[in-house]
Image (cartoon, grey):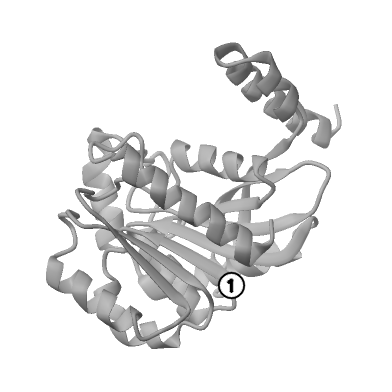
Amino acid sequence: MPLLSFQAYVGKTRFLKFAINDSLVYFCLTIFKVIRVPEIQIDALDGFPFSAYTSQPVGKNGPGIILIHGIFGLTSGLRAHCDALAAQGFLAICPDLFSRQRQEGVNVDYREEDSEQAQIFYNNFDVNAGIGDLLSTLAHLRRTPGCGGKLGAIGACLGGRLAFLMAARSDVDCAVGYDNVGIDSFLSELYDVRTPLMLHFGEQDSLMGEDARQKILKRAKRNEVIQTYVYPDAGHSFVKKTSPNYHPENAEQAEKRTRAFLAEWLKV
């Protein structure tokens, strides 16, 4: 069976499950809409090969999205998020920025028993090396057949910080960050942002103190390309449905703003 047919078949079986749970109509609309590509290898600027998951719409060009993971790395949930973005018309890719630390057989996902290993990955993470790997991902995405030219970045927690840094240090067309823990360590770079940037904050985020958030908001206000939103009664990871801090109303509002932002700047 040709590779394209095999990938389409994998997508078909995935959406057949949704059809059984939801409706045959949804199945008819989504069948063969997304090509789920097996994890690929990208060569970093220093020659190190790191892995990435990618998903893309079938039969048409589209803008690219780099999905940037948090401390749990490239999880099954982020793979599903890539597929959802592809169904919306994006070429989506999520690089494994912990590839440099990963040992054979050591994998984590978004679950309690993996918290200790995830924290080790986070503590040993080199931000500058991570940005370098994201720049390599950006270059790879630009060369990918079907990429329409416009590229954005989205991340949460550690990924939110890195999405901000991509807005400051790269030529992405827009970027979106959630939670954004650690941006206060890079305050001077808020003035380097020249591409549209949207930042979402939970007012009750226990991983970001009020002083740190206010410093970020104060400086961001001086840069007209940065939009900031603070959500009342929202904690860390308030948009993640599997998080104990999931807040449906605030999550819906934040996601609505993000969709409109991406549509405006990536011309979906």
Q: Nearer the viewer, residue 56 or 262?
A: 262
Q: In the displayed structure, does residue 181 sit left or right of residue 147?
A: left
SS label for mark 1? loop
Q: Where is residue 122 in the image (x, y as percent from the top left)?
A: 29, 58
Residue at the image point whose x is 62% and y is 54% from the top: 41
Disc 1 marks which amino acid?
Answer: Val
Residue at the image point whose x is 22% and y is 53% from the top: 232
Q: In the displayed structure, does residue 143 sit left or right of residue 205?
A: right
Q: Where is residue 38 in the image (x, y as percent from the top left)?
A: 64, 40
Estimate how packed mark 1 is, as few (under 14), some (14 to 19) or many (20 or more) residues with alpha carbons within 10 Å: many
Q: Position of residue 10 (x, y in %)?
A: 69, 27
Q: From this view, report whether residue 140 is shown above or below residue 119.
A: below
Q: Quadrant of the N terminus?
A: top right
Q: From this view, report whether residue 103 is shown above or below residue 159.
A: above
Q: Where is residue 256 in the image (x, y as percent from the top left)?
A: 48, 49
Does the image show residue 239? no
Would you name the residue on which mark 1 appears?
Answer: 172
Q: Quadrant of the C terminus?
A: bottom right
Q: Which of 241 and 8 is in front in this view?
A: 241
Residue at the image point whose x is 13% and y is 73% from the top: 211
Q: From this view, report whether residue 248 is shown above or below residue 64.
A: above
